Every structure is written in C-alpha cells, then in structure tokens.
Image (tube, rainbow, N blue to C red):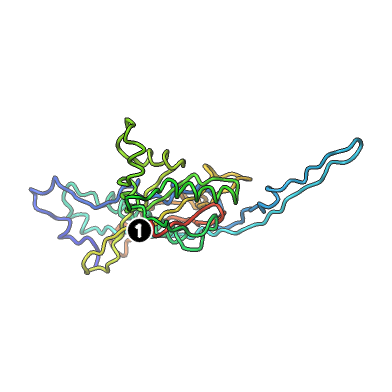
Amino acid sequence: MPQPTRSDVHVNKPLTNISIAYIQKASDFIADKVFPIVPVLKQSDLYFTYDKQYWFQTSAQKRGPGTESAGAGYKTATTPYMADVWAVHKDVDDQTRQNADDPLNLDRDATLFVTQQLMLRREKQFVSSYFKASTWTGAADFTPSTKWNATNSDPLSDVDNQKALVKAKTGFAPNVLVVTYDVFKALKNNASIIDRIKYTQRGMLTEELLASMFGVDKFLVASVVEDTAREGQAAANDFLIKNKALLVYSNPAPSILQPSGGYIFSWTGLLGAGAQGNRIKSFRMEQLASDRIEGEMAFDMKLVGSDLGVYMTGLL
C-alpha cells in the first residue's frame, strides 16, 4: 500500500499549522566527516598504495670524492575500488497530491525522506566497514582495564597510550576520535576529565573541548538511531552502534604520498551527481499516475591504512 495514504495527509483544519516529522539532523551523520572523500569520475578504478618499509629506512651513505651517491627506491601497488550505487524512491500519486492540505509539500517531504534513507544507508555502511573487531592493526583491539564510567578511570591516558602505539608503528599519531553516544555521555561525567577543566572558563564539555583534551583534530559522536522493527510491529529504536570508539589517523584531504586510515570514493562522474556521489531525480510515472522522487548515492568505503587505527570496545 502506498504510504502515506490520502487519510494521512488530509487533516482537520485546526491542525493545518502543525507538521511534525522525525528527521534526524544532518550533523548526527558522521560517515562523511571521518575520512576524506575522494571524488572520482569513474565508477571503478585503481589507486596506488606505498610500501611503508622503504619510507622508514635510510640508504644514505657517506660519499667520497668522485663517487656515486647511494641508490634507493620504494615499491608501490595498486588497489581497486568500486563505487556501488545505492538507490531508493518515493512516489507521489496524483490523487494524494490533489487531496493534500497546507502546509504539506509532498515533493519536498519526499525529497527529505529519500535523502534521509540514503544517509542512513551510508551511515550503516560506514559502521560495517570501519567498526569491526580485528580490522585495525595500529594496536590490538583495545578494552580498558578500568571502564570509562568508573570513578577511577583515566580515558585521556588510555587514549594517549594507544596513540603512542600507532605513532611508533607508522610515524603518524591518530588525529580523529569517534565515540558512540553512550561513551560520549560517560566522558562528559568522567571525574578525571572534569577535574582537568574545573578551573577553566569553559565548564561545559563540548565535542570541541574534548577534541582539545584528547589531542585530536576531530572528536566525533556516532549518534544516529535506527528502527529495526518490521512495518506494523512495535518500534525498536536504538543507536546504530554502542560502547565503541575508533581512534585513527585521517589525512585532512585526499593526497598522494600521504597516508590515511580510510578513504571514501564518491562517484561524482555519475550524471548530475554532487560532491558525495549523490543525486535526486524527479520524473513522471504515467502508468502509476504519479511523480517519482528518486535518490541515488554512489560510494565505496575503503580501509586504506589498517595500521593507522585502533578499534576500541567494551569501554563502559
């Protein structure tokens, strides 16, 4: 059955100044904020990776008069990507459109609905790609000996120790910390963290302040919610992921000869696509007496440098 039905959009006149939609804020979605987005013209292609061993050794030698300098080199390899196209549509039929009261704008609402669907899909792909056990090798998967919601815990030291392990292995200290919403709540009430800011003017523990305290460029909170119930069942809303964190080095922008824990390849070469491989189309479905609002998003999330990150679990 098409949703919404005619009765869903035709409401009593006293209620026409009220329109309520549970639309999650764009800022809650972090899939496009952790790793650089690489715009690509082709749906599939290759990218280069460098063998880091050659960059952490030196072949330089003393040079005598009239002699050649010592030679050196490095190895490269290629890795493929494939930007799968994810798509979803919402039809607006003529009868429902004709029967809709103000302030409903069915085309606008369908566009927002389709966009939210795609963003949720991308967020789920981000979680399944990067929040996995035994994926990151910068250090062994980390679980603190003292949980971060315990009064005697020290999350700042725990993170510093993990950053040091990654730095020693790769030469790059992680600059992004992603935590789930429950971990964020625990950190805001952690005694050791509160003690460090109690004499400062900024008494509110914001994400920006926590980024400064943890010594990272970005402190991000994974807070998107999903309803896993089937249609007609009682709602089963919960966070996509809980009690986890990812500490990782992310290059500020796509660049050759610069490492990054991950890259997101977005197919901008898709006709009409935006910077994130996304596009919204509207076209007539005459056989259905409807207008179709269709959204697409084409991307591939690649784990580029597994040794640049640490997966953290069982924090609470």
Residue type beneath disc 1: Lys
**Quadrant the N terminus occupies:** bottom left
The residue identified by callout 1 is 242
Classify residue 71 as left or right of residue 117.
Answer: right
Q: Compare residues 127 and 151 and report the one nearer the observer.
A: 151
Specify the farthest residue to the right.
Answer: 66
Task: Tell me how many marks there are.
Answer: 1
Estimate the x, y position of residue 39 in percent, counting from the top left: 52, 48
Q: Compare residues 288 and 196 and report the one nearer the observer.
A: 196
Q: Compare residues 132 and 157 and report the one nearer the observer.
A: 157
Q: Residue at x 37, y 54 (%)?
A: 119
Specify the farthest residue to the top.
Answer: 201
Element marked by disc 1? loop
Residue 185 visible: yes
Classify residue 169 as left or right of residue 220.
Answer: right
Estimate the x, y position of residue 70 in percent, counting from the top left: 82, 44
Estimate the x, y position of residue 253 in percent, counting from the top left: 53, 42
Classify residue 259 as left or right of residue 154.
Answer: right
Q: Residue at x 49, y 55 (%)?
A: 310
Q: Picture quarter containing residue 312? A: bottom left
Specify the farthest residue to the front.
Answer: 152
Q: Residue at x 30, y 46 (%)?
A: 189
**Quadrant the C terminus occupies:** bottom left
Q: Compare residues 28 and 293 and report the one nearer the observer.
A: 28
Residue 118 visible: no
